[in-house]
Amino acid sequence: MPCEMDSKKGQSQEGPEALFYQVRHPEAVLAQLNSLRHDAQLTDVVLLAGGAPFPCHRAVLAACSSYFQAMFGGGLRESHETEVDFHDSVAPEALGLLLDYAYTSRISLGEEGAAEALLQAADMLQFPEVRDACAAFLERHLRSDNCLSAFQLADAHGCSQLREQAFLSCLDNFVSLASSPELAMLPGQLLKELLASDDLNAPDEKIVIQACLDWARYDIKSRQGYLAALLEHVRFVLLPSSYFKEHMFNERLVMEHEASSALVKIAYEFKQQLHCTKMAVNLSMNPLARPRRSGHSLLVFGGRSFTSDGVFLVDVASHSIVPRAELPSPRKEFSACALGSHVYVTGGRGSEKSVSKDTWVYDAAADIWSRAASMLVARFAHGSAELSGCLYVVGGHTAGAGPSPASPSAALKQVERYEPITNTWHMVAPLHEGVSNAAAVSARGHLFVFGGTGGVSRGRPPCVQCYRPTENCWDIVASCPQPWRHTAACPQGDHVFVLGGDTECAATTAYRFSTVTLQWSRVGSDGLSARHLSCHAVACGRCIFVVGGYSGAQRGKMLDTYDPATDTWENVASIPYALIPTAFVSVWKSPPP
């Protein structure tokens, strides 16, 4: 029978193979070895860092680090020497802390500066668990004044999570970092990565250009050749034409370098083309014209009833909703989609419930409406999305042959494409399954349609349908995890976030769909609740903005933002209770002349 003893003393077990073990034995051995180290007893090697000696035991070092195991057990020169000098490649304080960890399994990370030096030493001497602990410590202490150094440190030492969070912090705080000495010390490739991001928080592109010039001037001889690679990511079209004439064309650092000079001239010519209104939407796909996060405006289309009659600007800075122009023709169950700085409102039903094929265009910069060519099929409860500078409308209903003119047809399969340059509509390949009240988005050069009533009516979950424009065909690529209708979908990189719906179950969950693997994963945020029933959502920058929806019979009155990177929610503004959102879009601010 087993005989149990006090855990502090040990445990034993009787039998053919009697076993005794002391729980505290490993800790006691380490403590004794550490005492021997401090007394320089039985030590067989001395590590030197910055001239400071650290007597220790080879066996302990080799047991803790593959670096020392290779050094002392691999037949290297150091395996026969009594001293190993790291000179200035390892900070003495960091080496002392690593040795404390090797002999005690504990380490004090202390202040940020010490943690940075410790991370470098831990990575070099191959203490991966200490490196990761330092990275987590630095991530918790990220601020605007240390994110650049953390970004560079994490990149150099392969700390992916710290790198990602430091990168995001650099994007958020770019205005304060642009003129800092630390930015001038940043490697060109890392600066280029920051400038390439649409999430760079630069309200004025002049700040970006000045940062590029300051960085190049820090070492003109070696950096002028790389300046063109940085300028490729400047959104030149967001600058006024006068800036080119007064500054860029007179900047010797730019104009005396062939590649940089050519780039600026191309950007100026491109900007002049944008004076042609018809070309603006199509050419805005060019990275020279694409605005950054601060160059977007959020617009809500709604009214006092389910019939929308106005446009409302969301002022995120002041947390307010500002009325803009009225809809020229009030309607409900329409679809709205932004192409550049214009919003295309298609179809819907008017006050007399007649189904419309109208296309109205709202110029967000001028706050005026104009009319475009009508769709080929009158429809309502349809979806719309932008793809490669064109507008696509999918599914919905049209007027059927029921007892009244408003009787809806079955869910439509027809898909139309609108080309802004020619102001014409064309039929493209139809959906495999007709849908209505489905979510349509574009991602990675394809059109994706999520849910809709078509699949539900057949007693099985609705599907994800994908349109390939080069082949003009649709594929069913996945099933939906919820019977979605009246849901919202927002593309973010290679993923599409889908949330909301017209059932309590669908509204309290959100999913992320990979457009690469075509697989679903559930978003586990505690912020999702029934208030997102039949909500509207749009991606702007790296966040998702959500407006409207219901919690039971109570209509939602908040505009919230969800950050997928941190899985957190934040309230942006209150929606007037009299305003019922019908559509929600993000438009580009019009570039200056």
Image (tube, grey):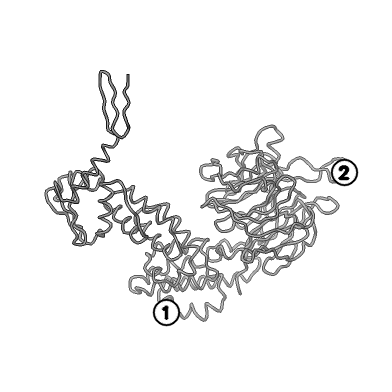
Q: Report the residue at 57% width, 56% height from top.
A: 543
* 468 with respect to 117 (left or right): right
Disc 1 secondary structure class: helix
Q: Nearer the viewer, residue 181 or 372?
A: 181
Q: Which of 478 and 314 is in front in this view?
A: 314
Asked which quadrant contains residue 166, the reply is bottom left
Which amino acid type corresponds to the residue marked 2 in the rendered image?
A: Ser
User: Which residue occupies the extreme right position in the image?
Assistant: 403
The residue carrying mark 1 is: 252
Q: Report the residue at 26% width, 45% height from top.
A: 64
Between disc 2 and disc 1, whose residue precedes?
1
Q: Residues within 10 Å of mark 2 (few under 14, many from 20)?
A: few
Q: Report the residue at 77% width, 61% height from top.
A: 327
Q: Name the spot of residue 194 as percent of width and height, x first.
A: 46, 62
Which quadrant is the N terminus positioned in? top left
Task: Kindly tell me whether residue 528 is visible in this rendering.
Answer: yes
Q: Which of 35 and 304 is in front in this view?
A: 35
Which amino acid type corresponds to the residue marked 1 in the rendered image?
A: Arg
Asked which quadrant contains residue 318, the reply is bottom right
Disc 2 secondary structure class: loop
* 444 with respect to 42 (left or right): right
* Residue 564 sits above or below residue 401 on the image: below
Label ID, residue 404 = 2
* 474 with respect to 11 (left or right): right
Task: Kindly tell me whether residue 69 is visible in this rendering.
Answer: no
